[in-house]
Amino acid sequence: MSTMTRGWRTATASTAAVASIVLLAACGTSGGGGTGGTSAQTELGELEGSVSILAWPGYVEDGSNDPSVDWVSGFEEETGCTVTSKSYGTSDEAVSLMKTGDYDVIAASGDATLRLIAAGDVAPVNTDLIPSYAGVFDFLKDKEWNSVDGQSYGVPHGYGANLLLYNTDVVSPAPTSWDVVFDGASAYSGKVTSYDSPIYIADAAVYLMAHEPDLGITNPYALDETQFAAAVDLLKAQREHVGEYWSDYLKEIQAFESGDSVVGTTWQVIQNVLAGEVSNTAVVLPDEGATGWSDTWMIASEAKSPNCAYAWLDWIASPEVNAQATAYFGEAPSSQEACDFRDDCDAYHAGDADYASKIWYWTTPIADCVDGRTDVECVDYAEWTAAWSEIKG
Amino acid sequence: MTTADPVRAERTPPPRRGGFARRGSVFLTTHPRARLALLLSAPLLWLVVVYIVALLLLLVTAFWTVDSFTGEIRIDWTFDNIVTVVTGALYQTVTLRTVGVAAAVTVIDVALALPIAFYMAKVAGPRAQRALVIAVLMPLWASYLVKAYAWRSVLSQDGILEWLLSPIGLHTPGYGLTATIITLSYLWLPYVILPIYAGLERVPDSLIEASADLGGGTWRTMRSVVLPLAFPAIVAGTIFSFSLSLGDYITVNIVGGTSQMLGNLVYTNVGAANNLPLAAAIALIPIAIIFGYLALVRRTGALDNL
């Protein structure tokens, strides 16, 4: 009896093993990355009647979250393209979701766009087919995160800077430099907060650009081994004084309300929320400049509804819709005309090219230095991620 | 059934009419193994597909690599991830920290649960007992996140703990490992109390009385009678608190300040880094630790009585 049972068990185990091998073989057929994708569409065809969109939360609102927040219904009425949408939480999630091929359109930040282009998941975009593109701020067009060799891969959506937030009761005089969270952080030890993402290493690089010119950093996303090591050392020293790292913006709001954090990196929308609750916080764009994000609407290279996708890109870039969507998320719109539909453009410095030039927009760090250097190899994002875990210890 | 329709019953004799069902039932009655197979195949399939295949996939993924730029998983067999995880200073530090937190949480929870469970099982009257069981279960009705965020505000610089402690010259520990241990101890306490309570309830009162009759004091009775009998239950409780703490990454994210545990490393490698193979390799650490713990527990014989 006992030998029988054992035999049965072995049989079950080997069945499981065989089944899993079959499964593994089935899983292991995904191909490698392609090259730059197909060429851009030259003319528009008939609308397909539906479009599938992948975007950051709050970018595709059809009134189901808040009846007064709805810019999808108007699009559906005008074009007859029914919208289905999915939101994602991180750029990396977006990159892996796009690989499923289920989406026609994606709103991607600069730390995802280049990866999507390199993997051949998105197609070049013919901006002549998008009337609203003409109104977009010039300083957002043809940038390294939305274009390759002068070929546009999408339409800019909105942008914002990672600012310095501080508690006016504790941090005085008012800071004008990132110094308060790096070399001067010991004054606020235990109450400094930082953004919890590998991309935050670029914030340290922006600081080093101004304070350690010998390192020769010209772009915080193109760091060679030495420059990268300097940024990592700076962040390891900063860690001694960091109270906590945040990635959930509600967590930072609560920490500033309770006084657990008094100085650190932030988004404009966080200050907007805080201003409604307490009066002792302020933000500043420090003299060294800052990192930031600039999002781009892109079209999948194997889109099932390319014409509806072009229609969406035009719709979302049109001033009134762009104003609604960027205001809802808390960022600057992509065109001057959009400011006519918003009363808070000044708070976001929309259209202020001088302010915008101080922002280093999130870009995927890759081995081919994005600052154009060819004599060295830059540290890529995988190593940024590994270093970030090490910085946090 | 067969007599309900005499006309049909006449045409088709009863043994044939019940044919299939009856023969099936006769077959099953005489073949206990087939009966068992029918009963267990669905749950077993579930167990194999969801549990064992998932674990095997995890194990196998740890030996693959990922294309760092496009994020595609490539099936190049390599030990790099395992070597990184075993030799990397970061992973050693974080593993030690995680095991330390899990051990501290387990010790605190057992220390709190033993007296509570003993009172519930042996001292309280039936009404009080019911009320206490409900009181212990009540926190489980609230969401995990709500409880963790509640502790975030309790432990804050202007939270209730600071308000309570500052008059006597003490301060809140603030966000960090201590806060993580406190919060996790709170979260897993019901999972430790309940098995110990169930175990203590099975200890016959007569044995405790006999010990008293033979001159055993309170401590002597506890040490020589109650604890040995309740030991398997205590071990069951520690398995809960230890394994749950070992895999936690949300609490430490909310109240842990800058600290990270193994779960956070897995999470960043799946989410931010899109490096599933390395995440799989890291996930093997807690699995190995838990297997080690279970092997240790098995040697004490505690599992035989579960």
Image (cartoon, coloured by chain):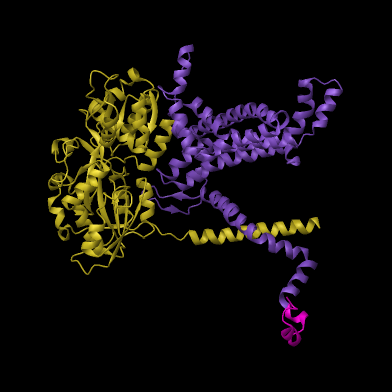
- x%, y% of residue B35? 73, 64
Residue furthest to the bottom: B11
Residue B246 visible: no
Q: Is residue B17 magenta?
A: yes
| Chain displayed in purple | B
Q: Residue at x 82, y 30 (%)?
A: B207
Q: Which residue is located at x 79 percent, y 31 percent?
A: B205
Question: Viewer-proximal residue, A128 or A28?
Answer: A128
Residue sitting nearer the eye, A312 or B93: A312
Q: Quadrant of residue B193?
A: top right
Looking at the image, can residue B275 be seen?
yes
Q: Nearer the viewer, residue A67 or B295?
A: A67
Residue located at (39% from left, 39% from top): A385
Tell me where the magenta segment starts and ends, as one range. B1-18
**Horizontal and vertical percent for residue B150?**
46, 31
Chain that appears yellow: A
